[in-house]
Amino acid sequence: MATIRPVPTLSSKGYVYTTEEKVDHLLAYALLSNASQTPMFRGQIMSFQELIQRTQGDRIALQSQADTAFNNYFSRYFDDVSTEIAVLDDPDDGRKLRLRIYISVRDNGRTVSVGMIAQFMDGIFKQVVRINEGTD
């Protein structure tokens, strides 16, 4: 029997249980959360903004740490996780950072894959665009 690991929300839903909703919420939390939003759980909050700050312009370190962080974060909720993170430069504006995120998870016999481009400016999240999404 598979272990059900719901993702908590701050909405009236309380928790989300479907694989697609869990992936969607976890990605949103990772991109929007601030590591300092709670002193009680310092070091336990997945925050891409903190990764940007910690790596201070080192794109290779950011890519490596982001891939590890996303993999560890999603592994809390799914048994089989594959992540691929690429840091993309914006040739028009050095203050902008684009992150190509590909995540594939297996949950209760189903695989869900999500790809997106997240854009940050001066370390602050600005927008996200889905580039693919699939299930089997």
Image (tube, rainbow, N blue to C red):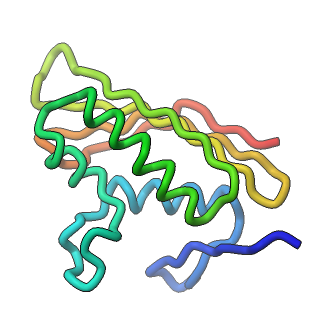
Compare residues 109 and 54 and report the one nearer the observer.
Answer: 54
List x then y, in percent, for residue 14: 56, 84
Compare residues 89 and 71 and report the one nearer the observer.
Answer: 71
User: Vertical placement of 128 versus 100: above or below?
Assistant: below
Q: Quadrant of the N terminus?
A: bottom right
List x then y, in percent, for residue 96: 17, 31
List x then y, in percent, for residue 98: 30, 30
Q: Is residue 56 left or right of residue 126?
A: left
Compare residues 52 and 96 and report the one nearer the observer.
Answer: 52
User: Vertical placement of 60 versus 43: above or below?
Assistant: above
Q: In the current view of this chain or complex, which residue is farthest to the right? A: 1
Q: Determine the residue positioned at 60% across, 41% down.
A: 82
Res 55 → quadrant: top left
Q: Determine the residue positioned at 11% across, 41% down.
A: 122
List x then y, in percent, for residue 29: 40, 62
Q: How many tags in the picture?
A: 0
Q: In the current view of this chain or complex, which residue is farthest to the top? A: 91
Q: Is residue 36 left or right of residue 101?
A: left
Q: Determine the residue positioned at 65% across, 40% down.
A: 113
User: Vertical placement of 109 versus 4: above or below?
Assistant: above
Q: Quadrant of the C terminus?
A: top right
Q: Is residue 71 left or right of residue 117?
A: right
Q: Determine the residue positioned at 50% across, 33% down.
A: 84
